Every structure is written in C-alpha cells, then in structure tokens.
Image (tube, grey):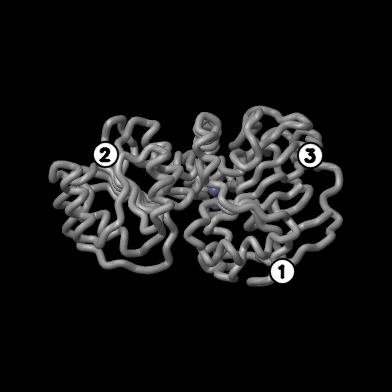
C-alpha cells in the first residue's frame, strides 16, 4: 500500500509500505479517503518540532490528522479499563468515520479535570503516531466517530470544526451577543459559522477579500479589514462604543492579542486559538481595569467532536466552498509545498487517499 512519508524536514516521499496487519485488540483498521492539510501540519513538515514538543521522535512520520476514513476491520475489544475517553459507540465495517486525533494519557491533571485536549503527554494521530496520508491506518477504536452519510471532504473537516466548537465553548458564547473573529482561514470560518448559528452577531476580520466573502456566506453580519485604529473605530461604532463582549483570535498573528485586549468590552472575553510563536507587548493594567478574561483554547474534547459532526452535517452545502484544492496521495508532498505558500485562493487543501 502507498503512504506519504515525511522522512525528514521538508522531505515527503511516496513509499510502498507493508501497512498494518490484522487490527490489534482495541484498534480498528480504516481506509483513509480524504485528509485535510492544516497549518499545524507545517511544523512537523518543516522541522519546527519545538512548536510541537521537545524530546520525541518525529521522523519518519506519516502525517494527516484531519481524516475521513472507511472502517475496514474492527479488532477484538480492548481489555477493560484501558479505553481512553472518546467515542462510546462501536463502529462497523463500511462505516464512514471522522478521527478525533488525540490520545490523552488519562492520568495527569488536565485529564483528571476532563480536559484531555491539553494533556501534556497526549499523542496526536499524524504527529506522534502515523496519520491519514496512507491507504490503510490502524487507530484506537475510541478515536473513531461514525458520521453516517456525510461526504469525505466534510468528514475530514469535522476535526478543524471541532476546534472552533471548543473555542466557543471556552468562550461561554451567548445568543445575541456581538463577537469579533480574527482570521477567516478554516478555523476562523468555522468559528464564524458556529457563532452565527448559536445566535451571535459576528464581525470577521481578514485581509483576503475572498475569505471575507466566505465569512459573510457562513453567517458573519459584517466583515472587516483595516489598520488597527480604523478597525477599532469601526468595531466601536458597531458596538455603540462598548466594544464587543467576545473576541476570538484564530489568525495566529502575534499583534492581535494586544489589539483584542484593547477592543474587547469591559467584562468581556478574549479567546486565543491561533498558534503563534512571537511575543507581543501587553498593558497589564487593562486586565484589572476592564476585568477581562483572556482564555486559551486548544484542540477539542470528544464532546466538542460530536457537536462538530452535527454542525458540519447541518451546513455541508455552505461548507463545500471551503474545499478549494484537491491533490491525490501520490502528490501529497506537492500539496504541502503548495499549502505552505498560503495562496490567497486556498482555504482547505484536501489530499484524496483511496
Ligand atoms: Zn488541524
Ligand atoms: Zn494526560
């Protein structure tokens, strides 16, 4: 069977590999169909593993954590007591599934606090163990969520959608409130959609006109792009001078956090989702003056994943516009090179596998 193997930074090669044998206890063999490429994939692909975690062996690795797959062979059940949090349902051969790619340790403080999505020892399918860019894949049963008749592209989008769902859960979003979403990439667009469907009034901020158009089609009341002073004036005007109660940062731009702290209303919340490696100056006095909450959000829980399946199913027609480019597995390396150039017309680049 074929696999796209990231052998070393920047080197992804198509190899004929033996693939998994019969599924081991607690595991399932699936046939990946569609794999979304995500900004977080670039860290491993480009060798920026410090952004992932220090002392682990990353290469060679088969990447891909946004996966739609068909169940080929469920293995024998796991011994009792070893199952991780995840899907409660059992899957059957032929089912289409989305993969919740986290394998948390189950014992650390975040795991005990029911927040396995930030387990410092978690392993991620496609990062710490092999992922979807191969024709057959063995994964623990609890990572698999059946999606019924959802199409492969949309199924691969459940994972990024779950990141948006989790961010809005962290945000304690209320119907009717005004929210500013920075960034209209896949996560920002999914956040815009989920917030609008939850009854929020959303302004989505992005420099790329085509992305702003998509944000509008997914439910943004307003879209914007302007220099910070002008943007602040626009948002102040939109919120009758109060500032929005919620700002969600998905762009990964370092400068957005200080801007969000300025923009958000007193008693408001800022949720940080975008990953950035830079540093930004903050005025600490703004925190007690405005009594704001600045909240981090990372990945998603299994419950968020279930919510994301419902969100994607209910909006599959409008989300179809996000799948801008497709590459076959044999050209996966080219797909990564293309994605890393961040062409403005690219939203979600999908590798089709089987
Ligand atoms: Zn991702
Ligand atoms: Zn843990």
The answer to whether the residues at label 1 and label 3 have Cβ atoms under 8 Å apart is: no
Earlier residue among tags 2 and 1: 1
**Residue 120 in the image: x percent, y percent?**
52, 54
Earlier residue among tags 1 and 3: 1
Residue 243, disc: none
Query: Which residue is tagged 1?
Result: 7
* Vertical position of residue 65 compared to residue 162: above or below: below
* Vertical position of residue 112 compared to residue 7: above or below: above
Q: Residues within 10 Å of mark 1 (few under 14, many from 20)?
A: some
Classify mark 3: helix, strand or loop. Answer: loop
Of the two numbered discs 3 and 2 in the rendering, the one whose residue sits closer to the viewer: 2
Q: Residues within 10 Å of mark 3 (few under 14, many from 20)?
A: some
In this view, the residue in front, 296 or 250, is 250
**Residue 57 in the image: x percent, y percent?**
66, 66
Q: Does any portion of residue 169 appear in the rendered image?
A: no
In this view, the residue in front, 128 or 61, is 61
- Residue at image x 66%, y 40%? 152
**Residue 168 in the image: x percent, y percent?**
39, 40
Query: Which residue is tagged 2?
Result: 178
Of the two numbered discs 1 and 3 in the rendering, the one whose residue sits closer to the viewer: 1
Classify mark 1: helix, strand or loop. Answer: strand
Task: State which quadrant residue 221 falls in.
Answer: top left
Earlier residue among tags 3 and 2: 3
**Residue 277 in the image: x percent, y percent?**
43, 66
Query: How far apart in space, not on screen, are marks 2 and 1 (Cα)?
Result: 46 Å
Q: Residues within 10 Å of mark 2 (few under 14, many from 20)?
A: many
Query: How far apart in space, not on screen, are marks 3 and 2 (Cα)?
Result: 48 Å
Task: State which quadrant residue 90 falls in.
Answer: top right
- Residue at image x 76%, y 43%? 31
Residue 25, disc: 3
């Amino acid at each position: 069977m074929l696999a796209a193997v990231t052998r070393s930074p920047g080197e992804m090669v198509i190899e004929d590999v033996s693939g998994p044998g019969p599924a081991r206890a607690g595991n399932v063999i699936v046939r990946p169909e569609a794999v979304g490429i995500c900004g977080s994939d670039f860290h491993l692909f480009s060798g920026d593993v410090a952004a992932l975690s220090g002392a682990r062996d990353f290469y060679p690795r088969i990447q891909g954590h946004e996966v739609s797959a068909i169940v080929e062979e469920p293995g024998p059940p796991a011994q009792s007591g070893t199952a991780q949090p995840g899907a409660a349902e059992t899957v059957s051969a032929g089912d289409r599934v989305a993969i919740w790619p986290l394998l948390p340790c189950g014992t650390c403080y975040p795991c005990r606090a029911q927040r396995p999505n930030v387990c410092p020892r978690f392993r991620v399918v496609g990062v710490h163990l092999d992922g979807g860019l191969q024709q057959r894949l063995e994964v623990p049963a609890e990572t698999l969520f059946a999606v019924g008749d959802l199409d492969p592209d949309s199924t691969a989008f459940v994972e990024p959608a779950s990141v948006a769902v989790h961010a809005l859960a962290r945000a304690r979003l209320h119907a009717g409130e005004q929210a500013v979403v920075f960034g209209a990439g896949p996560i920002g667009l999914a956040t815009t959609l989920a917030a609008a469907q939850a009854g929020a009034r959303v302004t989505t901020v992005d420099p790329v006109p085509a992305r702003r158009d998509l944000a509008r089609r997914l439910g943004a009341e307003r879209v914007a792009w302007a220099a910070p002073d002008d943007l602040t004036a626009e948002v102040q005007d939109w919120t009758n001078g109060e500032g929005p109660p919620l700002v969600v940062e998905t762009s990964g731009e370092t400068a957005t956090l200080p801007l969000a702290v300025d923009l958000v209303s007193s008693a408001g919340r800022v949720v940080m989702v975008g990953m950035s490696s830079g540093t930004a100056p903050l005025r600490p006095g703004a925190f007690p003056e405005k009594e704001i909450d600045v909240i981090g959000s990372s990945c998603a829980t299994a419950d968020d994943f279930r919510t994301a399946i419902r969100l994607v199913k209910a909006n599959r027609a409008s989300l179809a516009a996000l799948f801008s480019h497709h590459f076959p597995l044999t050209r996966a390396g080219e797909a990564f090179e293309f994605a890393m150039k961040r062409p403005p017309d690219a939203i979600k680049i999908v590798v089709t596998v089987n």
